[in-house]
Image (spheres, rainbow, N blue to C red):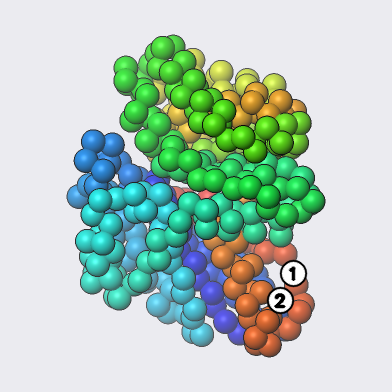
Amino acid sequence: MENFAVIDLGSNSCRMTVTEIDDDGGFKRSQMNKQFVRLSEGMKNSGALQQEPMDRTIAALKEFYEEYSKLPHLTLKAVATAAVRSAANQQAFLERVKTEVHGLNIEVISGTEEAHYDYLGVINTLPVTNCVIMDTGGASCELVLVQNGREQNLVSLPFGSVNLSETFLKHGVDQLAAVDLFRLSTGVQRLFNGLWWLQRGQNLPLVALGGSNRTLAKIRRKEKNVSDYEDVHGFRMSVSEVDNVYANIIERNLADRKAIPGLSKDRADIIAAGITPIVTIMRFLDAGRVIFSENGVREGILYKHLDQLRAQGKIGDHKENISTTKKNAGNGKKSDKK
């Protein structure tokens, strides 16, 4: 039996999952942890990771170490995405992590690798063969066109909930200004217009992942009084439902946004910018519905690892769905499904 731990250091949150892999190839998720670190905060002007976000991230990684270091038969893979990928002080930060977090090595993956892992996480856990996958993070947005179950085109765009908020919400995040929202949606639309292949995704279902997009689903599930509202994997929303939730968010001030059921207070200041891309792309694609996925980069890394173990003859071919155990998510205080 192997404990396979994956750490995903994103621009807004740092997450870890641990999956137990049996010798026959069966596997189940045993631990999950999420910390809001907002690593990309303040990068807009200097292009460098700032001291306080780095300190928060180091503290989160130390907490993760306290968990994974106790596990027997451990295999650990840690990756970093947009914030570290674009940071001017990337190497200094990675060296600091290695020094302060017991030799932890973090691999900085490219945007296309991130999109590929998203594809693997989705295609192995949702019954979709033709779709557009969208992963909106804190500082990047990955898009994948899937046709006949295969990835045809993929890209990572340099925008997400944190840097869109910092770039476009010039009048602040308390009472959102119409002019800011107009410039935000227009800027996102222009980037989509520049992707020639994205037109081939018109009328296909959209599969959405990433913290902001999943928050959209959680809000709607709360409205519908779904008991386990955080379990959004496979949940569907129509374009009108998406528009209604978006309208409800942008008409409120920050304090009222924090009171929306299903919306984490830690995300209330960036949620409007965070879900503007999904609202925009649904219109661009003329998509009638969106399907939400809990599984993305970390699960994609897991499925790639499982394939490698099978190819090496180290495990059998038995397969089973990922089962989830809630574990210390959300600043170490509350549980969250992903």
323 to 252, vertically: above or below: below
- At 46% from the left and 24% from the top, the residue drawn is 187
54 to 310, vertically: above or below: above
61 to 155, vertically: above or below: below
Q: Position of residue 323 (x, y in %)?
A: 67, 63
Q: Position of residue 90 (x, y in %)?
A: 28, 57
What amino acid does circle 1 point to? Glu
Q: Nearer the viewer, residue 168 or 38?
A: 168
Judge from the rendering whether residue 54 lies leftward or rightward of residue 320; answer left or right. Answer: left
Query: In whole angstroms, how far apart are the C-alphas of marks 1 and 2?
Result: 6 Å
- At 45% from the left and 56% from the top, the residue drawn is 110
Label for residue 148? none
As helix, strand or loop, the secondary structure at mark 1 comes to: loop
Q: Position of residue 2 (x, y in %)?
A: 57, 82
As helix, strand or loop, the secondary structure at mark 2 comes to: loop
* Residue 237 seen by the camera: no
Judge from the rendering whether residue 96 lies leftward or rightward of residue 314; answer left or right. Answer: left
User: Would you call the spot at circle 2 few (<14 residues within 10 Å), some (14-19), or many (20 or more)?
Assistant: some
* Residue 308 seen by the camera: yes
- At 43% from the left and 40% from the top, the residue drawn is 158
Label for residue 320? 1
Q: How many marks?
A: 2
**Image-quadrant location for residue 123:** bottom right
- At 23% from the left and 65% from the top, the residue drawn is 96
What amino acid does circle 2 point to? Gly
Judge from the rendering whether residue 6 lies leftward or rightward of residue 151; answer left or right. Answer: left
Q: Position of residue 286 (x, y in %)?
A: 71, 25
The residue furthest front is: 196
Q: Which residue is mark 2?
A: 26
The residue furthest bottom is: 313
Q: Earlier in the sequence, mark 1 or mark 2?
A: 2
Judge from the rendering whether residue 148 lies leftward or rightward of residue 257; answer left or right. Answer: right
